[in-house]
Image: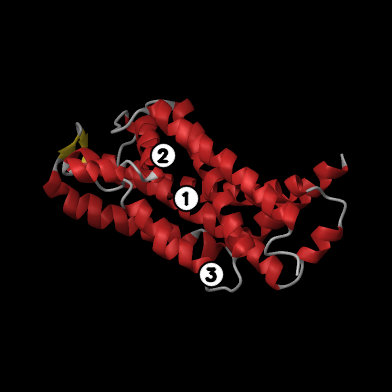
C-alpha cells in the first residue's frame, strides 16, 4: 500500500509538472501538427495522389500522431528526471523506503500520460484535415501505449547517464528525430530502392509507425506481429537496463 502511495505521488508530480506549463508542453505540438497537415497534406499531398490506396493526407496522419507521442513521452522523462538529478532532489528518493521499480514506473508513467495527451491533441487536429476511421482499435491502442512506454524508458536512461543539459538534447536531435523522419512517416518504404528498403528495416520506429498506421487505416509495409515483437523486446531490454542503472547508482550516486 505504501508503494502504491509513492507511485501515485510520483505520477501526480509528473502530470502536474507538464500540465502547469501547458503552453510549452501541449500547445507547440498542436501548432506544429497543423503546419505539417497544411504543408505536407494539403499543398504537397494534392500533387502526390494516393499511397497504397490511401490519400496522402490519410497516409501521413498516423505517422505524425505517433511521431508526436514518441518525442513528447521521451522529452517528458528525460527533462524531468535530469532536473531531479540537477537539483539534488534525487537524494530524497534514494533515501526513501521506495524500491527502484516504483521510481522507474512513476517517471515512465508520467511520460506515457504526456505522450498520450499530445497524441490525442494531434489526433483531434487531424480530424480537421482528414477523415480517419479506426481499422483495428486493439492494435491502435496497444501500439501507441507500447511506443509511449518504450520511449519513456529511453528518456529515463538518457537522463540517468546525462552529465549536463547538453547531453539530454543530443539523443533527441541527432538520433530520435532522424529515425522518426526516416521511419516512414511521410512515405512508404516500398517506394525506396531495394537496398534502402533493407536499411530502413533496421529502424525500429518504422515498425511502430506501420503498426499504428495499420490500426488506423489498414495499410502497412511490415508484418504486424513482428512490429509488436520488436517493440516488446525493446521495452523488456530497456526496463532491465533502467533497473540495473538505478541499482548500481550509475549517474545518480556521487
**Mark earlier in primary sequence (3, 1):** 1
* Depth order, front residue of 151/212: 151
The spot of residue 88 in percent (x, y) is: 75, 71
Q: Secondary structure at mark 2?
A: helix
Query: Between 151 and 112, which is closer to the camera in this rendering?
Result: 151
Residue marked by disc 2 = 208
Tell me the tag on residue 167. Answer: 3
Residue at left offset 68%, top offset 72%: 86
Please tell me which residue is depicted at 59% across the width and 74% down the height of the picture.
164
Can you give x and y, in whole percent of width and height, for residue 203 in the image? 36, 46
Identify whether 252 is placed above or below 116: below
Q: Secondary structure at mark 3?
A: helix
Q: Is residue 228 left or right of residue 193?
A: right
Q: Quadrant of the C terminus?
A: bottom right
Q: Position of residue 233 (x, y in %)?
A: 52, 36
Pointer 1 residue: 70
In the image, what residue occupies the spot 11% across and 49% down?
A: 47
Say if residue 49 shows up in the picture.
yes
Q: Residues within 10 Å of mark 1 (few under 14, many from 20)?
A: many
Pick whichever of labels 2 and 1 is earlier in the sequence: 1
SS of the residue at dot 1? helix
Amino acid at each position: 500500500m505504501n508503494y502504491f502511495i509513492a507511485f501515485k505521488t510520483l505520477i501526480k508530480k509528473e502530470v502536474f509538472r507538464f500540465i502547469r506549463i501547458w503552453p510549452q508542453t501541449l500547445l507547440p505540438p498542436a501548432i506544429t501538427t497543423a503546419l505539417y497537415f497544411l504543408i505536407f497534406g494539403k499543398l504537397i499531398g494534392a500533387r502526390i495522389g494516393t499511397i497504397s490506396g490511401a490519400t496522402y493526407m490519410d497516409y501521413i496522419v498516423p505517422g505524425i500522431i505517433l511521431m508526436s507521442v514518441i518525442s513528447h513521452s521521451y522529452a517528458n522523462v528525460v527533462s524531468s528526471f535530469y532536473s531531479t538529478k540537477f537539483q539534488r532532489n534525487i537524494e530524497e528518493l534514494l533515501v526513501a523506503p521506495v524500491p527502484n521499480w516504483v521510481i522507474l514506473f512513476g517517471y515512465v508513467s508520467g511520460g506515457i500520460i504526456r505522450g498520450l495527451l499530445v497524441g490525442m491533441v494531434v489526433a483531434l487536429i487531424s480530424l480537421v484535415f482528414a477523415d480517419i476511421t479506426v481499422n483495428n482499435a486493439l492494435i491502435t491502442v496497444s501500439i501507441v501505449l507500447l511506443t509511449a512506454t518504450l520511449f519513456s524508458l529511453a528518456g529515463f536512461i538518457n537522463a540517468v547517464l546525462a552529465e549536463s543539459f547538453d547531453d539530454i538534447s543530443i539523443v533527441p536531435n541527432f538520433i530520435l528525430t532522424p529515425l522518426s523522419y526516416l521511419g516512414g512517416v511521410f512515405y512508404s518504404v516500398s517506394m525506396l530502392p531495394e537496398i534502402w528498403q533493407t536499411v530502413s528495416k533496421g529502424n525500429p520506429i518504422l515498425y511502430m509507425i506501420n503498426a499504428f498506421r495499420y490500426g488506423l487505416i489498414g495499410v502497412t509495409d511490415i508484418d504486424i506481429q513482428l512490429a509488436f515483437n520488436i517493440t516488446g523486446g525493446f521495452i523488456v531490454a530497456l526496463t532491465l537496463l533502467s533497473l540495473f542503472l538505478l541499482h548500481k547508482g550509475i549517474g545518480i550516486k556521487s
